[in-house]
Amino acid sequence: MTALASIKNQDIAALMRDMGINARKAALELAQVPSEPKISALKAAAAKLRDNADAIIAANAKDMEAGRAKGLTDALLDRLALDPARIEGMAAGIEAVAELPDPIGRELARWSPEHNGLDIARVSVPLGVIGIIYESRPNVTADASAMCIKSGNAAILRGGSESFHSSRAIFDCMAEGIAKAGLPDNAIQMIPTTDRAAVGEMLKLSEYIDVIVPRGGKSLIARITDESRIPLFKHLEGLCHTYVHASANPQKAVDIVVNAKMRRVGVCGSTETILIDSSVAGRLLPRIAEALVAKGCELRGDDIAQSIDGHIKPATDEDWVTEYLDAIVSIKVVNGVTDAVNHINTYGSHHTDAIIAENAAATTTFMNGVDSGIVIVNASTQFADGGEFGMGAEIGISTGKLHARGPVGVEQLTSYKYIVRGTGQTRP
């Protein structure tokens, strides 16, 4: 906790209002900044991260110690942990964002109506001010800052208490790099308190903040949805499914399922429920179960799954709606692709779902039927990542349908306006 964590609510309200005013001013300036200074700022920020890797790791050690004392799970500690490789990954990610085409000022369409002769163009512009509220992943500080700067948006960041020291150390590097390139003051700001009241005040700042991006668990998302006066890009839980169809290649099925669940169990693209076709469950499920158990995964399944493999414990109704973020997976035997699609649309979070199949008709039915932001065929759900999509990074995976869906990259952090050019026309 910082000294500001205990200040009175009215002082937090004043703090947040000042941050909103400063962000709006910075956003108006950023919208006019050409591409090269933004690239320079991000490259300077990446260099600062590398130069200050030891200080970032020392700050992270404080968060890790507090997390262990708090009883965070191994999966959540993995989300929180930083090491030289992860810091290098953050720096490289910032550089990748820097090298992306500038999403601002693009002419999206242009036409001239015959009846009035006007020259009308639709041109991309920044959204303005973006508020990002996140929990235990400190790398979001770097990713979100980089993407907002690249897309000409000002950002107000609110990291979780678990990652407070780590996020602050990363933020300081980002701010130094941005200042070095001469970008506006307050282009990015981080809320300097862990007091939950700050979030409540932030959600009232509709005069200054254009969109809120929440990244976290059910309770955080529920609170923000209930309280926000500002539009949201919802990054809901990753209740992801992998469906093994009757036509699946057996070895491909084993390899993909194990990777989808166990590569990193604490990320939102980790598969939480395995669906397997009844016609192949008897011969494929034992192979999949054995491979998962060998990796330390706990298996919970329906009655049919339990009868097929002795490693599988009974699942409850709660298991079908649980994002474990841990080495646990639920397993259900289904009767064909339509049954699988119905289960996913009923219990899933519309994040990422995959089918393993060699039958083209089955994959088409699955792709058309599953109502999720990302639908994958014959690959791991852990590819649900903006970097893997070639976006450099992402600010989240949007599970909503308005404005942005799936990975929210720099292009998704833009809106547009119409530029209308005339030659003296007046409307009759």
Image (spheres, helix red, strand yellow):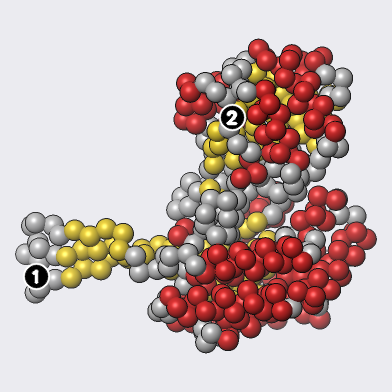
Say if mark 2 contacts mark 1, CB within 8 Å: no
Extreme residue in the front direction:
251
Q: Amino acid at mark 2?
A: Ile
Q: Which residue is mark 1?
A: 426
Q: Quadrant of residue 8?
A: bottom right
Residue 423 at what x, y percent from top left? 10, 73
Residue nearer the viewer, 350 or 391: 391
The answer for how far apart the CA atoms under marks 2 and 1 are is 57 Å
Name the quadrant containing residue 323. top right
Instruction: Confirm whether residue 3 shows in the render.
Output: yes
- Please provide percent x and percent y for residue 366: 52, 27
Residue drawn at the location 84% of the way across and 73% of the way down: 58
Q: Quadrant of residue 70?
A: bottom right
Camera-side mark, 2 or 1: 2
Relative to 122, say whether 322 is above or below.
above
Q: Which quadrant of the figure contains the C terminus?
A: bottom left
Disc 1, SS: loop
Q: Which mark is residue 293?
A: none
- The residue sitting at 80% across, 37% down in the picture is 328
Mark earlier in primary sequence (2, 1): 2
Q: Quadrant of the N terminus?
A: bottom right
Q: Which residue is mark 2?
A: 355
Front-most of 323 and 64?
64
> How many numbered dots are placed on residues in this image?
2
Callout 1, which amino acid? Thr
Q: Depth check: 306 or 156 in front?
A: 306
**Residue name at image x 22 percent, y 60 percent:** 110
Q: Residue at x 86, y 37 (%)?
A: 296
180 relative to 395, above or below = below
Q: Work out whether residue 7 can be spotted.
A: no
User: Vertical placement of 72 versus 49: above or below?
Assistant: above
